[in-house]
Image (cartoon, rainbow, N blue to C red):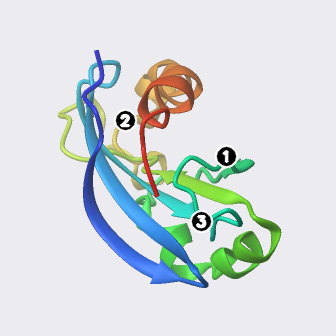
Amino acid sequence: MATKPTEIGISKVFGGYNKRFKHFSPTLGCSMTFHIYFPPSPSHSSSHKFPVLYWLSGLTCTDENFITKSGAQRAASAEGVALIAPDTSPRGLNVEGEADSWDFGVGMRKLFFFYYYYFMTILDMNCFTSLEI
């Protein structure tokens, strides 16, 4: 079972919050990080639900690339949309072939099925149900 995410960073941006989390994923067999941008809540309640946009960065990117470089929080704040940006290339897993090609991150070809499962089930249902702004 995936561990509950631990908050490892926070910053205030465009009236909302960028929060960075870390958790262990048994599906991938490693710790994973992800960012969530929470736009300002119109009701000033931590239980407000927002529509979500998932951003999957390139194969060699971390969860920080999009969050720190895009400026997407400005539009997300104006539209009331949460942004979720998981790391798409965990490092140091010692997967066979991980150093053979820089453009596939750490053995991404071998991990594709597990990543699909991780993104569609673990991230979508388990991790975000109890996070607060």
Q: Residues within 10 Å of mark 3 (few under 14, many from 20)?
A: few
Q: Depth check: 16 or 2 in front?
A: 16
Front position among marks 3 and 1: 3
At label 2, the amino acid type is Gly
Asked whether the viewer can see residue 57, the reply is: no
Residue drawn 63% across the image and 53% down it: 55
Residue 44 marker = 3
Q: In front: 71, or 113?
A: 71
Image coordinates of residue 67 in percent, x first then y, are 52, 71
- Point 68% across, 75% down: residue: 72
Which residue lies under the disc numbered 1? 49
Q: Earlier in the sequence, mark 2 or mark 3?
A: 3
User: Could you tell me which secondary element the residue under label 3 belongs to?
Assistant: loop
- Label 3 to label 1: alpha-carbon separation: 11 Å
The total number of labels drawn is 3
Image height of 56 relative to 78, above or below: above
Up the image or down, 64 lies above or below 117; here it is below
Above or below: residue 78 compared with residue 87: below
Q: Is residue 50 left or right of residue 78?
A: left
Residue depicted at 43% across the width and 50% down the height? 132
Q: Which residue is mark 2?
A: 107
Displayed quadrant of residue 44:
bottom right
Q: Secondary structure at mark 1?
A: loop
* Crowd rating for badge 1 (residues with CA inside 10 Å; few <14, some 14–19, many 20+): few
